Image (cartoon, rainbow, N blue to C red):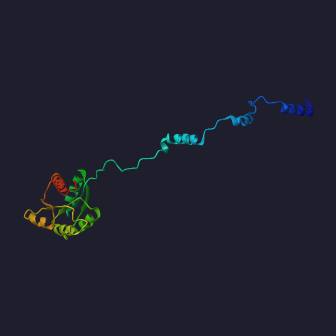
Amino acid sequence: MRPPDQNRQRRLQRRAEPSAGPTLQSPFLGLMRIRGQVQRPAPEKAWDADERSRTAQPEHRAKAPWRGPERRVFVPPAVLIVDDEPDQLDVYRQYLHFEGYRVAVAGGGRLALDVALAARPDVIIMDLAMPGMDGFEATRRIKELKTTRDIPVIALSAYGEMPPEWALAAGCETYLRKPILPQDLSEHIERVLLRAGRR
């Protein structure tokens, strides 16, 4: 083991000797000595390189404005069936629902006014002979309201002797006699929707 004076003298000799250059043992000192020899890019070139690196990545590109859906979503027509006979009401409701319509029902004329205002159907199937407010009065009131006057109404009645002109005078588009098959009713609905521009 060397005495402390010899170690100190050896360290002083190393400091006095000229260095041969940076070594792996002193990387920081080596970098500090050669920092003046490293060529740095001009400020404008550095800015161009930074711009190129930014624009080369897709997340920095400006996104195209969203223009909405490319296709329309089909919404099936809504049908309101008004009848005071629950059995017929259920038969027509089930068949038209099976055919793809959106179906609402009302068991009387007064309820038909409320449902027509709330649901805004595309067509109304109106039974004419009902207790309380009949189909004639309900149709007249529907046609008087601004929000429902353009809804076409198809009149249904079991009374064969009733003149069709009465239904037309009340504001109905067409008059059909009961009993009527559900598929025939569906064909009349399609014709009325086409004429009214709702198909």
Instruction: Mark yes or no: residue 130 visible.
Output: no
Count of numbered marks: 0
Is 172 on the left or on the right of 20, as rendered?
left
Among the 4 quarters of the image, the one containing residue 154: bottom left
Measured as percent of width and height from the top left, residue 27 is found at 73, 34
Residue at the (55%, 39%) spot, across then down? 49
- Between 20 and 1, the one lying in front of the other is 20
Against 27, residue 164 (above or below) is below
Q: Residue at x 12, y 64 (%)?
A: 168
Q: Quadrant of residue 12?
A: top right
Percent position (x, y) of residue 151? 21, 62
Task: Give the quadrant of the N terminus.
Answer: top right
Q: Position of residue 161 (x, y in %)?
A: 7, 64
Question: Relative to residue 34, is residue 190 depicted above or below?
Answer: below
At a point 17% along the width and 66% down the height, the residue shown is 135
In the image shown, does 38 or 52 lie closer to the viewer?
A: 38
Report the residue that reaches farthest toward the bottom.
132
> Can residue 135 be seen in this snapshot?
yes
Image coordinates of residue 68 in percent, x first then y, are 36, 51
Relative to 9, 81 lies left or right: left
